[in-house]
Image (cartoon, rainbow, N blue to C red):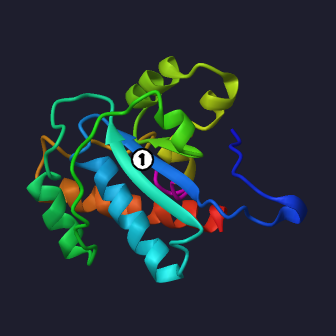
């Protein structure tokens, strides 16, 4: 599965950054964790002007809320700072605002694809599992919401590996 980012003549990037959107169900665990991890990687690589990111959920359960405290604690243990994120819901307008839309699981991928109006929009939707390490063995990012701290830490670790691979591909 391929996605296309903007480029100018001669393969040079355009002045507008490549925009990445991470998506999960409620936007309080997996997708904001991916956003914060990816943002930290962008900062570390000095790529903030070339690539930007955000996150959202397909459901409106938690709109306006901070990420789950257990996810924030797992991110803190991994050295990832909280960026002030507040949950928001995916909008069809996000197809126009983002170059790459990365759902964390198949259910949310299907939901987003159902909203795509064109093949070009659908091509922007690429599951996070595309960037999992080969030894991972998981088909999607597991939802840690109903588990304990170990599940949140495992998701953070998986997202760190996948986000690094996305950044490598985009840069």
Q: Residue farthest to the right?
A: 10
On screen, residue 111 above or below 12: above
**Left or right relative to 121: residue 113:** left
The mark tally for this picture is 1
Mark 1 is surrounded, within 10 Å at the Cα level, by few (under 14), some (14 to 19) or many (20 or more) other residues, namely many
The residue under the point 21% across, 46% down is: 28
On screen, residue 56 above or below 14: above
Name the quarter where the N terminus is drawn: top right
The residue under the point 38% across, 41% down is: 23
Magenta stretch holds residue 134 = yes
Which segment is the magenta one? 132-137
The residue under the point 63% across, 59% down is: 16
The residue under the point 26% across, 74% down is: 78
Toward the viewer: 155 or 72? 72
Q: Main secondary structure of the magenta part?
A: loop
Magenta stretch holds residue 125 = no
How far across and how far down the image is residue 36, in percent? 33, 63
**Left or right relative to 88: residue 66:** left
Residue 162 appears in the rendering: no
How far across and how far down the image is residue 113, in percent? 52, 24
**Which residue is under mark 1?**
22
How far across and how far down the image is residue 3, in percent? 68, 43
Name the quarter where the C terminus is drawn: bottom right
Residue 41 appears in the rendering: yes
Toward the viewer: 34 or 21? 21
Helix, strand, or loop for circle 1? strand
The image quarter containing residue 149 is: bottom left
Q: Residue farthest to the front?
A: 15
**Left or right relative to 78: residue 118:** right
On screen, residue 112 above or below 42: above
How far across and how far down the image is residue 35, in percent? 37, 58
């Amino acid at each position: 599965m391929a996605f296309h980012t903007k480029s100018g003549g001669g393969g040079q990037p355009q002045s507008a950054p490549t925009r990445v959107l991470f998506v999960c169900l409620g936007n309080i665990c997996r997708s904001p964790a991916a956003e914060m991890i990816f943002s930290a990687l962008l900062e570390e690589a000095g790529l903030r002007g070339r690539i930007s990111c955000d996150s959202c959920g397909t459901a409106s359960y938690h709109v306006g809320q901070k990420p789950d405290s257990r996810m924030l604690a797992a991110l803190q243990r991994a050295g990832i700072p909280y960026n002030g994120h507040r949950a928001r819901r995916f909008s069809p307008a996000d197809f126009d605002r983002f170059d790459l839309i990365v759902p964390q699981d198949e259910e949310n991928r299907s939901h987003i694809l159902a909203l795509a109006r064109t093949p070009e929009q659908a091509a922007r939707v690429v599951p996070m599992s595309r960037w999992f390490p080969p030894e991972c063995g998981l088909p999607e990012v597991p939802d840690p919401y109903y588990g304990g701290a170990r599940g949140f830490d495992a998701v953070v670790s998986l997202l760190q590996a996948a986000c690094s691979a996305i950044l490598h591909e985009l840069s």
